[in-house]
Image (cartoon, coloured by chain):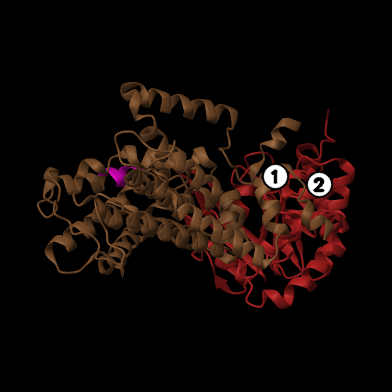
Chain colours: A brown, B red
């Protein structure tokens, strides 16, 4: 029992945060942002990834995985709906960028809201009929949706079918910061900004009515409905917000990769993002961030063992999930604990 | 008439669980619906609160047919259910659970403290446990919480689904005493029970439900002395 407590990083972190005054909190946030922002310059250290360049790995998979996991966490972690087709929204964002970027003069930043809007519309359209379903049934329908989107772009002429779309424009420079393929640190900073924005959004919503409603829906949907929570509305909201984040990630991904094809949007991606969420700790933002970082980074870090790499990756997953079944940084299990803070107040 | 159910039919897939039931609940009454397992008692309540769709028939509340109104809007109208199996939010504290009962209310801030006091007055135990997670409460406390949370919505009709289920005899007596107390504050109560003895003692009128049909309707005190009912539901029959 004692040993477990040393491992309770979540409570340790929460303690520091709660006992800190406003200036200290601002300082913590700023220092962390600067430290993470400096990551692309640490490519020469032990962190370096063989073969792939370090700053590219930081953008994709690491940054993108974190962003998408945070989006999926709104759906899976906050409101408790199992979504196995999350890649669909990523694909919708990416294809919006690819098609509009190659056929019109709009740049990435102008396409970004359009891509997010399309992903959200898809989220609402899928959500209205399917979110009446629960648990396993919802998982199967969303899985189907993910595959439908992939098959549609694979078999349509406007998406250039299996050939994919090439020559997608890079984002235009922001002030003195230029986007380059050889040096992707600006991309990383943009992803980081999007991650921060997402975290900020989730944290705001969590303490307000939507957060309460999602929490109630996750714990007991019938009881939530009986308390007057319009459950379908809030489920669609959560689904749509998740879709928006996925769409935003897709737009940026297409603009960074310059080329997209249907094979990039397979079920594997959905599963991997879900694995990031579960591995890090469902429902806990920081857990999800850490989980996605580890799962995004690890395969590239151990690329030197080539063929055995996926085996090691799988082993790490199995071992960690065995010792920490609720993820690396699980959310608070209040079902089992007396909440002391309020009791003392 | 506060609540009137006319020729209600409810299906689970192809199976008909409620086969044309009509029930009347008058203002200020405690009406109980008793019956064995699988008689359709819980289905009745879930249909009235809106969790189950109606196949045919009407649910008339304050003169309006609400059978197509979604469950969360029926709460606004004044129907509140304390779900079976004490469907509380296990990961929320007692206070947060109670606050959820105010989720839909427009002027919830103004009402909150007043209603919390009312609930704490009825259930002093809940006040002692305000900051404890719902899932860590005992069975009886969870039942109190479920009823208290339902009261937070300021219901006109309170639907109670087997409040005695799985509780110790003393706790059952306690819960039923409080139900009567709630009724005296002007809340109409529709009570579904297997514990016919307690339910019939507390209720004004009673219906007996058997496999989806109402087989008897009478004053509760009459049923309490009815030999057939005694044999079937009160366990004081031939053996």
Q: Which residue is mark 2?
A: B140
Which SS type dominates the magenta stretch? helix
Residue at 36 percent of width and 35 percent of height: A300
Q: Nearer the viewer, mark 2 or mark 1?
A: 1
Image: A68 above or below B183: above
Query: Residue under mark 1: which chain is it in?
Result: A
Of B239 and A285, which appears nearest the observer? A285
Q: Taking A167 as reference, is B37 left or right? A: right
Q: Identify the magenta region.
A: A143-147
Residue at 54 percent of width and 55 percent of height: A32
Tell me if I can see residue B19 in this picture. Answer: yes
Of B17 and A179, which appears nearest the observer? A179
Q: Position of residue A160 (x, y in %)?
A: 11, 50
Q: Which mark is residue A267?
A: none
Q: Taking B5 as reference, is A274 left or right? A: left
Residue at 45 percent of width and 43 percent of height: A292
Is residue B124 rendered magenta in the image?
Answer: no
């Amino acid at each position: 029992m004692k040993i477990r407590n040393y491992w309770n990083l979540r409570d340790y972190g929460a303690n520091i945060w709660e006992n800190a005054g406003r200036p200290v909190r601002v300082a913590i946030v700023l220092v962390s942002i600067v430290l993470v922002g400096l990551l692309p310059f640490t490519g020469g250290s032990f962190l370096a990834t063989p073969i792939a360049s370090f700053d590219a790995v930081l953008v994709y998979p690491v940054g993108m995985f974190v962003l998408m996991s945070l989006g999926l966490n709104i759906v899976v972690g906050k409101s408790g709906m199992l979504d196995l087709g999350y890649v669909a929204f990523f694909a919708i964002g990416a294809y919006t960028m690819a098609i509009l970027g190659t056929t019109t003069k709009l740049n990435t930043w102008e396409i970004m809201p359009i891509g997010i809007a399309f992903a959200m519309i898809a989220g609402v359209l899928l959500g209205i009929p399917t979110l009446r379903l629960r648990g396993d049934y919802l998982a199967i329908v969303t899985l189907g949706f993910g595959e439908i989107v992939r098959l549609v772009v694979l078999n349509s002429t406007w998406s250039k079918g299996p050939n994919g779309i090439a020559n997608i424009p890079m984002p235009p420079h922001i002030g003195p910061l230029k986007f380059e393929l050889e040096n992707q640190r600006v991309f990383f900073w943009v992803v980081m900004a999007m991650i921060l924005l997402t975290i900020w959004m989730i944290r705001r919503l969590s303490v307000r009515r939507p957060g309460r409603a999602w929490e109630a829906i996750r714990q007991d949907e019938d009881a939530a409905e009986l308390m007057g929570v319009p459950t379908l509305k809030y489920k669609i909201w959560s689904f749509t917000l998740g879709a928006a984040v996925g769409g935003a990630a897709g737009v940026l991904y297409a603009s960074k990769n310059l080329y997209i094809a249907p094979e990039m949007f397979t079920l594997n991606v959905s599963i991997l993002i879900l694995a990031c969420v579960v591995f890090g700790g469902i429902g806990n933002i920081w857990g999800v961030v850490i989980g996605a970082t580890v799962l995004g980074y690890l395969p590239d870090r151990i690329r030197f063992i080539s063929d055995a790499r996926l085996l090691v990756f799988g082993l790490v997953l199995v071992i960690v999930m065995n010792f920490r079944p609720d993820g690396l940084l699980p959310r608070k299990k209040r079902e089992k604990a007396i909440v002391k803070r309020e009791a003392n107040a | 008439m506060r609540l009137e159910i006319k020729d209600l039919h409810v299906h689970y897939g192809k199976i008909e669980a409620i086969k044309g039931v009509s029930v009347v609940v008058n203002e200020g009454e405690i009406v109980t619906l008793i019956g064995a397992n699988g008689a359709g008692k819980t289905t009745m309540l879930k249909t009235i609160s809106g969790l189950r769709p109606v196949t045919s028939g009407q649910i008339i509340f304050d003169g309006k047919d609400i059978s197509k109104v979604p469950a969360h809007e029926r709460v606004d109208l004044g129907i509140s259910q304390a779900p079976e199996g004490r469907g509380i939010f296990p990961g929320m504290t007692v206070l947060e659970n109670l606050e959820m009962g105010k989720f839909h209310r427009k002027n919830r801030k103004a009402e909150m403290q007043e209603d919390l006091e009312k609930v704490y007055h009825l259930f002093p135990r809940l006040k002692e446990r305000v900051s404890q997670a719902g899932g860590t409460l005992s069975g009886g406390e969870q039942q109190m919480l479920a009823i208290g949370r339902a009261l937070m919505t300021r219901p006109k009709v309170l639907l109670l689904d087997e409040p005695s289920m799985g509780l110790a005899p003393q706790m059952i007596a306690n819960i039923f005493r409080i139900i009567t107390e709630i009724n005296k504050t002007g809340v109409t109560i529709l009570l579904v029970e297997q514990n016919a003895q307690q339910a019939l003692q507390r209720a004004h009128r009673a219906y007996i439900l058997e496999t989806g049909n109402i087989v008897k309707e009478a004053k509760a005190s009459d049923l309490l002395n009815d030999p057939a009912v005694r044999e079937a539901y009160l366990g004081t029959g031939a053996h």
